[in-house]
Image (cartoon, rainbow, N blue to C red):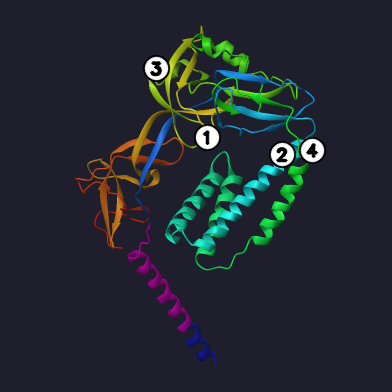
Amino acid sequence: METFAKRILTAVAAVLLLVYIGYHIFMANYSPVKVESAQRFEEYETIDTDGLVVRKEAIIPRQNANAFVYYNAQNGSRVAKNGRIADLYESQEQAADHKEILRLEEEIAEMQAIQEQGQNNRVNLDIITKQLGKAQAEVIASMSAPRVNHIDALSDQLLTLMNKQQITIGQDIDYTSRIAELQSRLTTLKSKAVAPIGAVMSPTAGFFVNSVDGFETLMDAESILSVTTDQIRSVMAQEPTVPQGQYIGKVVGSYEWYLVCVLPAEKMTQVSLDRSIDLRLPYVSSDPIPVTVVATNRDREGNMAVVFRCDYMSADLSDIRRETVQILVRHHEGLRVPDDAIRFNEQQEPGVFVQEGNVIVFKRIQVAYHSEKGSYSICEINDTDKSYLQVFDDIVTEGKDLYDGKIV
């Protein structure tokens, strides 16, 4: 019995010894690596600050405090001089009836267009499909934008195109009863509708904004080039109040507007007078905004009151005031390389190990910019010399005992 037990223990010890030896042989010859594809990448060096927007704005006072306002112009839309901005009604019910009449007329028109599509089949299915794809892309882009604008109109357009597509491919859609129901409601509303008691016209051509924030009179666009750091700080620190119901809104009367901010003296070389530069307002739009530096007024401490002029206006930009600003002072573009992957060869040239098939290869890099936003660098692209890192090369980010020519 004792001999049998010794044999069992000896066998177990032998198995363990073989496993131990096999493990070390395996680990000596196997070196797993993790890779990351080299991709084109761009980044801006930025100066982050807070800015104040100054425009030429015409405030529209509310003449009849007891009247109810129905806006004909959408917020951020363009209006002509003496164009109709709003209608005035004696009661809220009258204004609501007018709004419902317009909504019903629009819905009936859409349904009739879809119905005619099914009866006449005049529109090519490919055209509708392309329009539908474009509308879907616009909805997705609008939802992912910093500001969501016109989403209701985009959703209505998308629904109309989907119905047109269904009816074109043979889906039985009949809106006859629904149209009749809406027309009956429309007739009832029109029978009791009353005319507005007045109208609000635009004092100038420009972009209409249906709100007033109180900053309109705190800084003058006509004298903005002489603004000081103390003036900017003073205005930005204020929280002006506007009496409710005192104004209809305002019209931004010029495509030209200004953004002012205070920067420390060491930034003077990056934001010099007359320089054309781009700004980004991350809470408004992801698109760069081209501007020109038109004033850099220094104070006794060396800080600068910087004035940027922009000649571009849009619905998104028409009602902004105090904003987080990124001044895009320098643009870098190249291959994104993790800092942990950078090594040096015998000549002390920087580079990375790249996996080509089952072989590890050292490839050189030229670092153009080290990002302060993450642990990576942007390297120049050298398409002519294959000894340098190329687009889509597999950069080794993790691995043991790496060297040029190693088999993995």
Q: CA distance from mark 2 to mark 1?
A: 38 Å
Between the residue at mark 4 and the residue at mark 2, the CA separation in whole angstroms equals 9 Å
- Which residue is under mark 2? 98
Q: Considering depth in this image, is 239 or 101 the residue closer to the camera?
A: 101
Specify the amino acid type for callout 2. Answer: His
Q: Residue furthest left?
A: 384
Going from N to C along the chain, the mark reached first, 2 or 3, is 2
Cα–Cα span, label 4 and label 3: 57 Å
Quadrant (top left, top right, bottom left, bottom right) of the N terminus? bottom right
Residue ID for mark 4:
93
Q: Quadrant of residue 252?
A: top right
Give above or below for 19 relative to 200: below
Q: Verify whether residue 15 appears in magenta.
A: yes
Which of the two marks, 4 or 1, is nearer to us in this view? 4
Tag on residue 282? 1
Q: Nearer the viewer, residue 220 or 240?
A: 220
Q: CA distance from mark 2 to mark 3?
A: 54 Å
Furthest residue toward top:
300
| Residue 272, disc | 3
What span is in magenta? 11-34
Task: Look at label 3 and name its amino acid.
Answer: Ser
Q: Quick one: 35 or 225, which is closer to the camera?
A: 225
Sequence order check, earlier mark of 2 and 1: 2
> Which numbered disc, 4 or 3, marks the residue closer to the eye?
4
Whole-percent x, y for residue 347 in the image: 22, 41
